[in-house]
Image (tube, rainbow, N blue to C red):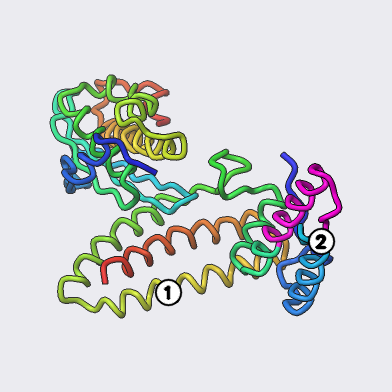
Amino acid sequence: MIIPDHFALLSLPRQVDIDRDALEARYLELAREFHPDRVVAADGAGQRAAVERSSELNEAYRTLRDPVRRAEYLCKLGGIDLESTDPKQGAPAMGHAFLLDMIERRERLAVARDGGDIEAFRGDVERELSAVTATAIAELRRERIRSAAEQLVARRYLQRLLDEVDAGS
Amino acid sequence: MAYSDKVIDHYENPRNVGSLDKDADDVGTGIVGAPACGDVMKLQIRVEDGVIVDARFKTYGCGSAIASSSLVTEWVKGMNVEDAMSIQNAQIAEELSLPPVKIHCSVLAEDAIKAAIRDYQAKHAARAPRSEPVTEAEASK
């Protein structure tokens, strides 16, 4: 599978820390250049190609401007695709203790809803979410892809838990 | 995406929700997760004389994941352990008419029942008296 190079398209170095201003500037410049309205003279194939380039550009921009999506994308470039269940190249499986904790926290969430401190529960999950995201980014700076991917998978489980907290309030 | 009637039925009236004592000798517990979406599933069985007499689950995830685990607990009650071990996710997906994007939910349920059986077998392999030799294949599970 060929992974599109979002960094190259937006003229940015392939790294986890990016220059946001440079990203915005380059995106706007290319968005004008690739805009399908600008290729009115082109034939059908030319028009389609313009639409495709615009769509690739938007995908690149959406991926790179969001720190989590950018981190997940860097893992994918590094050989670990979080959307895949492949044991080697897919999302790393979490350990038993982590999954057990995710189950037990749902049970504590039910207690917290039933007269407990739901805000404290939410605060804990939010702090952990920030912590694993920060660790994932730090690991990517050191080019430790697998370790970063593990943190990003933990983040997805925590995000799911947070969604449940929010859905019930 | 439209859920099938069977998925909606299990989602609205899930069978066998709950927990068994995970430390009990006759209980096996399987806990699995789906890294792509963050769903988690706990499935437990109670075994008497090689037959699954009770099954419970708790699933925190989408309707298809809940329905898949609910269905599996219904199926395995009364089954012997070996037969339950051979349940395939395709059977679950077919019964619930899961669309391709939800096949991973049936995989999760298959993984959960297998993990529960392995946990039960591991408890018994560890505690088996010397007069009942444990095969290497069982011991390594």
User: Is residue B6 one of those drawn in magenta?
Assistant: no
* Residue extent of the magenta highlight: A39-60
Residue sitting at 19 percent across and 46 percent down?
B12
Residue sitting at 25 percent across and 29 percent down?
B128
Residue type indicated by callout 2: Arg
User: Is residue A47 one of those drawn in magenta?
Assistant: yes
Looking at the image, residue A107 sits to the left or right of residue A3; the answer is left
Which residue is tagged 1?
A126
Residue type indicated by callout 1: Glu
Q: Which of these two is toward me, B120 or A122?
A: A122
* Residue A21 image position (x, y, % from top left): 75, 79
Chain bearing tag 2 is A
Q: Quadrant of residue B48?
A: top left
Q: Which of these two is toward me, B17 or B113?
A: B17
Looking at the image, residue A38 sits to the left or right of residue A100; the answer is right
The CA span between labels 1 and 2 is 45 Å
The secondary structure making up most of the magenta span is helix
Asked whether disc 1 touches disc 2, contact meaning CB atoms under 8 Å apart, the reply is no
Looking at the image, residue A118 sits to the left or right of residue B108; the answer is left
Mark drawn on residue B40: none
Helix, strand or loop status at disc 2: helix
Q: Quadrant of residue A134?
A: bottom right
Name above or below for residue A100 compared with residue B89: below
Residue sitting at 38 percent across and 51 percent down?
B39
Which residue is tagged 2?
A38
Q: Residue furthest front?
A: A41
The mark total stands at 2
